[in-house]
Amino acid sequence: MALSETFISEELHPIDIVETLAEHQEWEFDRIGEDQIAMAVEGQWRTYSVTLAWSAYDETLRLVCTFEMEPPAEALPGLYELLNHVNDQCWAGSFTFWADQQLMVYRYGLLLAGEQLASQEQITTLISAAVSSAERFYPAFQLNVWGGRSPKDALEVAIAEAYGRA
């Protein structure tokens, strides 16, 4: 049975859908509460912490995808400039750096106003887009912070397309 068949004609809480998806994908997860779930999603570069929370008040499913980053203080101006360039490349969601927690953060909110229901496909796309964006720009963040590359040079790595086969 396809995963999407699990949800046919049922009005499920969005976090219930995420939990079923996490089980299906065999991701480690913790159902923090009725309206929140945290997962560990393995990427090529690292494991990302992905948290989804439902807000009934504004009918929004919020996604936060994080990974640790401890840039030295002198690298912060370049990192913030790079974040501006990166966010120009992101059509859905955006990155920010939470200095107090030393976390790079990708955030997105799926608005479901008017009592709309989130579909399994929407949630899968939401999580996939977050991890793909983190994977795409991770090398640029590393090159800028630890490799001493300028924000524009570091970004070229993230937006360059590879051709051919290895």
Image (cartoon, grey):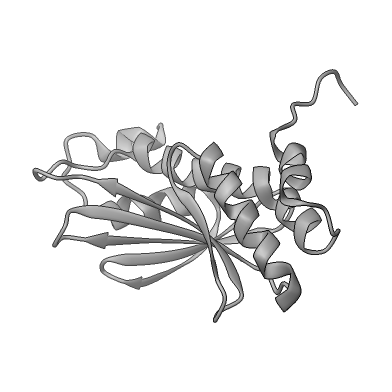
Q: Residue at the spot x=78%, y=52% of the render?
A: 150
Q: Is residue 90 left or right of residue 165?
A: left
Q: Is residue 32 left or right of residue 112?
A: right
Report the residue that reaches farthest toward the bottom: 100
**Can residue 131 be seen here?**
no
Q: Residue at the spot x=67%, y=69% of the render?
A: 76
Give percent across and percent down for residue 125: 44, 37
Q: Is residue 11 above or below residue 160?
A: below
Which of these two is toward me, 39 or 152? 152
Give percent across and percent down for residue 41: 58, 55
Number of marks drawn: 0
Which quadrant: the C terminus? top right
**Can residue 51 be seen here?**
yes
Which quadrant: the N terminus? top left
Report the residue that reaches farthest toward the right: 166
Give percent across and percent down for residue 85: 59, 45
Give percent across and percent down for residue 32: 37, 74
Report the residue that reaches farthest toward the left: 114
Residue 68, image quadrant: bottom right
Report the residue that reaches farthest toward the top: 164
Which of these two is toward me, 66 or 23? 66
Which of these two is toward me, 70 or 6? 70
Which of these two is toward me, 11 or 149? 149
Q: Residue at the spot x=74%, y=68% of the render?
A: 75
Q: Is residue 62 left or right of residue 156?
A: left
Q: Residue at the spot x=32%, y=33% of the render?
A: 5
Q: Is residue 160 above or below residue 148?
A: above
